Image (cartoon, rainbow, N blue to C red):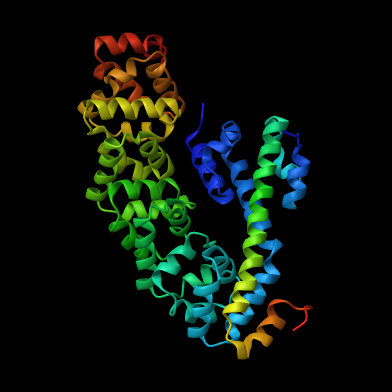
Amino acid sequence: MASTDVSALAERLGTSVDELAAFSACSPDEVAHLDMLVAAVFAAEAEAVESGLRATLTAVPRPLRGRAKALLFPGEDA
Amino acid sequence: MTSLANRVEIIKLADVLNVADAELSALVEVPPADIKTLRVAVGEAIFHQHESRFRRIAKLAGAVPAPLSARIAQLALSPLLGARVAAVMEPDVAVKLAGHLSSTYLADLATALDPVRAAPILGRIPSATVLEVGRTLVERKEYVALGRFVSVIEADTALGVVRAATGRDLLQVALFAEDLDALDTLVQRIEDERLVEAIRAAHADELYADAVTLVASVSPASQERLVPLITALDASGLNAFARSLHDYDAWDAALPALAGLDDAALGALANCEATLSPGMLPRMVEVATELGLSDLVDRLPGVLDAEHKKAAGKALTST
C-alpha cells in the first residue's frame, strides 16, 4: 500500500493539515488507507450524481426535455 | 483504552464512508472530536463538489408542478441524490414536493439527508409525515440517521418516534445522537418504564457498553434516573455494567448517581464479583475522590464486604 501523509488527505478534503493533525499519529499506511476510502466515496458520489442527472433528464416528459437539458447540462447541445 | 465516544464516532465515520467500521480500526487511538472533524470535512467536501449540480436539479424541481417533480424524483433520483438536492431546495418547493413523495422514498432519502442543512424544510413538514418516516427508520434500524434527526426535529415528534421503538432501538438511537442536549431533553421526557425497557434490552443483548454510553451522554439529572435502573439488574447485569464502566473508564459518568443510592443498592454494585478485578475498586475510589464525592468514599467501607475491602486495599485507607 502506498503511503500518504495527512497533507494529501487534507488537500483532497479542501481542509488544512492543522485540522487533521490528530491523524498524524496513525501510520503512513493507515493514513493512506483512510485517504483511499475517502477517494472511493468521492468517486461513488460522482458516479451517482452523473447517472442521476442523466436519469432525471430521461424521466422528464418529452415536451419539457429541452428546457430540462439546458438547465441540467448547461453548455451541452440541446 | 477505547473511549465510548471514540467507538461511536468511528461507526458514524464508517457510515459516511459507506464501509464497515472494522475498516477504521486504526482510528481507535484518535480522539473522537478529531474523528468528527474528519467526518464533517468529508461530508462538506462531498456536498460542495457537486453543489452546483444539486442546485440545477432543485431549480428544475421548482419549475414543474410538484406531482410531476415527485414522479421524476422517485423514478430517476437515487435517495442519496434526492437527499442532496433536498438540502438546497427552496423550503416552499421542498415541502410541496414532500407531500407527493411516498413515505418509503422519504425514509430512503432520510438516511442520506443532512438534517442540519435541511432543518428549514424539516421544520415545515407535517409532524405526521416526520413521525411516519421516523418510525420507518426505526423499523429499518437506521440508528445513525435517527441519531442525526433527534437534534433537529421537534421534541414532541422525536418522542413519538422513540415511544414506538423497542427498548433496544431506543438505546441505539441514543447511542448515535448527534446533539447530546437534544438527547437529554428526550431522555427527560421518556417515561421510566421505557427507560427500564431500554436497560433490560441492554442486559438481554449484553449491550452494556451501549448502556454506559447512554449514561455518559446525558445530564446529571438523567444519570440519576438511569443508574438506579441499572443497579436494579440481577448479579450478571451488575457484573457486566461494572466491567463496562471500568473498561471504558466511565466511572465519572456513573459515580455521582451512585452516590445518591441507598446503602443496599450501592452495596449490590460495589460488592459484585466484577469489582474484585484487580484495580477496579481502587480506580472507582480514585475517580470518586477526584470528583469530590467524599460522602460516597466515606460510605464505601461500610457497604463493602471483607473480600471487597481487601480488593480496594489502600485506596480506602488513604482517603
Q: Give the x, y percent position of residue B276.
A: 33, 15
Q: Nearer the viewer, residue B258 or B157?
A: B157
Q: Nearer the viewer, residue B20 or A51?
A: A51
In this rendering, position of residue B305 left or right of residue B210: left
Specify the quadrant that holds the C terminus of chain B: top left
Residue B302 sits in quarter = top left
- Extreme-bottom residue of the structure: A63
Q: Give the x, y percent position of residue A25.
A: 68, 31
In this rendering, position of residue B42 left or right of residue B301: right
Residue B58 seen in render: no
Q: Give the x, y percent position of residue B42.
A: 65, 52
The residue positioned 66% from the left and 49% from the top of the image is: A40
Name above or below for residue A25 compared with residue A48: above
The residue positioned 53% from the left and 49% from the top of the image is: B15
Q: Give the x, y percent position of residue B219.
A: 40, 45
In this rendering, position of residue A6 left or right of residue B77: right
Q: Nearer the viewer, residue B302 or B83?
A: B83
Query: How many numbered marks appear?
Result: 0
Q: Nearer the viewer, residue B155 or A28?
A: A28
Name above or below for residue B72 compared with residue A42: below
Residue B73 seen in render: yes
The residue positioned 72% from the left and 76% from the top of the image is: A73
The residue positioned 51% from the left and 26% from the top of the image is: B1
